[in-house]
Image: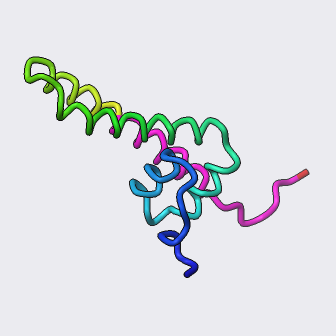
Amino acid sequence: MGSRSDKPSSSPGLAAALDRFPTLSRQVEGLFELDEDFRGLCEDLADAQTALEASKGLPADIRDARRLEYEELVTSLSGEIKEILSRANVILLRPPRT
């Protein structure tokens, strides 16, 4: 019907950000559409999550190191996205003085 879950995600990056920040879906969708840097972070998050999942199939001698590396990357990218979303959530109550 009209909910977010009924809309097909046009990119893995958008889907990754929406999954990570479901309560901020409107802000995520708006920034994803308008901000190329934000879009890039979301795409990087999706890639890191894919790599993290794929690391489960790596040989045992490198699996743990790669898993840790990708977990840290996912955490870092999520933090950057969260920071951008929190800054974008600021509402001016009055117009700036001219």
Q: Position of residue 70 (x, y in %)?
A: 29, 30
**Residue at x 21%, y 29% (from the top left corner):** 68
Does the stretch in magenta take in 35?
no
Residue furthest toward the left? Answer: 60
Which residue range is magenta in the image? 74-97
**Residue at x 67%, y 43% (from the top left corner):** 35
In the image, 83 versus 35, the foreground residue is 35
Quadrant position of residue 49: top left
In the image, 91 versus 10, the foreground residue is 10
Quick one: quadrant of the N terminus? bottom right
Residue furthest toward the bottom? Answer: 1
Left-right relation of 69 to 77: left
**Residue at x 39%, y 54% (from the top left corner):** 20
Residue 25 higher or lower than 6, as above or below: above
**Residue at x 66%, y 38% (from the top left corner):** 36
Does the stretch in magenta take in 83?
yes
Q: Position of residue 82 (x, y in %)?
A: 46, 48
Q: Tell me which colouring the rendered structure shows.
A: rainbow
- The number of discs equals 0
Residue furthest toward the top? Answer: 61
Q: Position of residue 60 (x, y in %)?
A: 8, 23
Left-right relation of 14 to 78: right
Name the magenta segment's main secondary structure: helix
Left-right relation of 60 to 27: left
In the image, 83 versus 72, the foreground residue is 72
In the image, 53 versus 42, the foreground residue is 53
Quadrant position of residue 73: top left
Residue 77 higher or lower than 18, as above or below: above
Q: Position of residue 44 (x, y in %)?
A: 47, 34
